[in-house]
Image (cartoon, grey):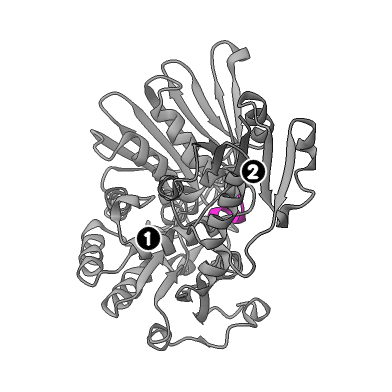
């Protein structure tokens, strides 16, 4: 019996895929089809795969051409599969000619002619494209650049009053305005970066106009306003999604899968740090009213793994804060402590202090260490009492996770399924509620640090 193997993503299965698989089937008696995982595709630079792994596997099954279907998960797996499955022929499309010649040491390699003019990329590019508008200040520059890596989205306009907006980045944008209503009239969806105090009104207006919204977190400054926005989004069949880029990275997703598998036993503690040094003169006095404080700048990112792993039903919390201004609006530093029935979590955030931005998750059988900056996670280590059992996990992180976030937003709009949200409404709401408690001075303990003066 001649065994043949081939591999592919098979996203949006089309005639070209089917023709190639028929030719592969004709090469032997038994055809094995390897379907690549989404994570492996990301590592290879294919970040806009629209169908899930199971959807793609089911599509291959329905063709009835594969005698066996396997999953390709890592670099170098082809050699392992060829050896372990006793493969006679490896085959792939002729556009890869020469790429897999190294496999000739293990089996025959055949490059098959592809069907001209058909590809998943072409199909994706011909689908209805999302017209996206950007609202904000400095971060929209990076967001705009990341949009260029994603199929299916066109940035058609920018709304900003920021005087230092880099025109060169937006040369291909014909519509740049300070009139938000004019931008809304031109787009299907909006990305909002603006000041946390302005987001509620910007989001509400967009949702009422039937526009989907991707917004930096926190979406609102209190839970009541968040619930109101969520209700408007539901009524108008619009997506309202948090733009915490960490939640969309491959490493972050893999870390949580490992934790759920019990790799370090029961989680008893999580310690998260997010800090940055800001110019204290630029955030002092009256100017603090226009600046993002530590709680809104770093709080949502730091709270994300706590609420996603331990849940939102903690028994109590404390917020220990050092304020910069006499109005007690700008926290130079804050430490949050969440007490759960069987665990505890601590968060250290600050725009006027500096510490190692790491994350440590402590378990009954080991712990996970994520080095700084953990929110740009591309590597973490699982550590045990016996260091010889330690294992490191590496994953490619493109564009700090922003492009994965954009893809998730597009897919969410297409599916309109809240169950596939990377950040649930419950977690998003709890972030807003915690920030509300901070603003209301609830559960807040004020400290004064030596060497840091009150500018009030």
Observer-nearest of 198 and 369:
369
Give the residue at x 46% y 48%.
Answer: 60
Query: Taking 172 as reference, is 357 above or below it?
Result: above
Q: Residue 328 magenta-drawn?
A: no
Residue that protrudes farthest toward the top in the picture: 386
Compared across the picture, whether 9 is left or right of 228 comes to right
Residue 401, x across and y down, in percent: 55, 53
Question: What is the secondary structure assignment of the residue under circle 2?
Answer: loop
Residue 47, x across and y down, in percent: 56, 55
Which residue lies under the disc numbered 1?
A: 412
Q: Is residue 204 visible?
A: yes
Which residues make up the magenta segment? 397-402
Q: Badges 1 and 2: C-beta atoms under 8 Å apart?
A: no
Compared across the picture, whether 417 is left or right of 376 comes to left
For the residues labelled 1 and 2, the Cα–Cα distance comes to 40 Å
Observer-nearest of 416 and 286:
416
Compared across the picture, whether 385 is left or right of 182 comes to right
Quadrant where the image shows the N terminus: top right
Quadrant where the image shows the C terminus: bottom left
Which residue lies under the disc numbered 2?
A: 27
Query: Taking 361 as reference, is 306 above or below it?
Result: below
Compared across the picture, whether 300 is left or right of 170 comes to left
- Camera-near label (1 vs 2) is 2
Residue 338, x across and y down, in percent: 32, 35
Query: Taking 453 as reference, is 69 above or below it?
Result: above
Numbered-mark total: 2
- Characterize the local packing of mark 2: few (<14), some (14-19) or many (20 or more) Cα atoms within 10 angstroms: some
Q: Residue 399 magenta-drawn?
A: yes
Give the residue at x 29% y 77%.
Answer: 210
């Amino acid at each position: 019996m001649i065994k043949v193997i081939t591999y592919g993503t098979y996203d949006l299965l089309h005639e070209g895929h089917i023709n190639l698989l028929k030719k592969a089937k004709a090469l032997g008696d038994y055809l094995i089809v390897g379907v690549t995982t989404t994570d492996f595709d990301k590592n290879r630079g294919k970040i806009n795969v629209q169908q899930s792994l199971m959807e793609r596997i089911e599509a291959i099954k329905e063709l009835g051409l594969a005698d066996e279907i396997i999953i390709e998960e890592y670099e170098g797996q082809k050699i392992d599969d060829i050896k372990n499955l006793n493969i006679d022929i490896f085959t792939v499309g002729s556009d890869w000619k020469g790429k897999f010649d190294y496999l000739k040491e293990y089996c025959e390699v055949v490059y098959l002619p592809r069907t001209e003019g058909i590809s998943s990329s072409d199909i994706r590019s011909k689908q209805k494209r999302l017209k996206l508008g950007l609202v904000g200040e400095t971060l929209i520059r990076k967001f705009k650049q990341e949009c260029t890596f994603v199929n299916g989205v066109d940035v058609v306009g920018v709304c900003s009053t920021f005087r230092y907006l880099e025109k060169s980045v937006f040369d291909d944008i014909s519509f740049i305005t300070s009139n938000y209503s004019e931008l809304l009239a031109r787009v299907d969806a909006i990305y909002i970066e603006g000041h946390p105090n302005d987001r509620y009104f910007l989001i509400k207006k967009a949702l009422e106009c039937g526009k989907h919204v991707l917004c930096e977190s926190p979406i609102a400054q209190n839970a009541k306003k968040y619930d109101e926005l969520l209700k408007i989004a539901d009524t108008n069949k619009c997506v309202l999604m948090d733009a915490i880029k960490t939640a969309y990275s491959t490493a972050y997703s893999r870390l949580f899968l490992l934790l759920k598998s019990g790799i370090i036993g029961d989680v008893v503690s999580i310690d998260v740090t997010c800090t940055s040094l800001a110019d204290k003169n630029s955030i002092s006095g009256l100017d603090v009213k226009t600046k993002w404080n530590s709680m809104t700048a770093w709080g949502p990112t730091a709270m994300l793994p706590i609420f996603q792993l331990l849940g939102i039903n903690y028994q109590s919390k404390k917020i220990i804060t050092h304020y910069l201004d006499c109005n007690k609006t700008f926290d130079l530093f804050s430490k949050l402590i969440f007490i759960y029935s069987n665990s505890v979590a601590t968060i250290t955030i600050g725009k006027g202090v500096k510490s190692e931005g790491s994350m440590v998750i402590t378990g009954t059988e080991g712990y996970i260490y994520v080095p700084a900056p953990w929110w740009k996670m591309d590597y973490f280590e699982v550590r045990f009492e016996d260091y010889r059992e330690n294992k490191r996990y590496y994953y490619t992180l493109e564009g700090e996770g922003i492009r994965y976030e954009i893809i998730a937003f597009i897919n969410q709009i297409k599916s309109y399924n809240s169950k596939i949200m990377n950040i649930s409404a419950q977690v998003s709401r709890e972030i807003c509620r915690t920030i509300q408690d901070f603003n209301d001075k609830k559960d807040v303990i004020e400290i004064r640090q030596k060497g840091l003066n009150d500018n009030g």
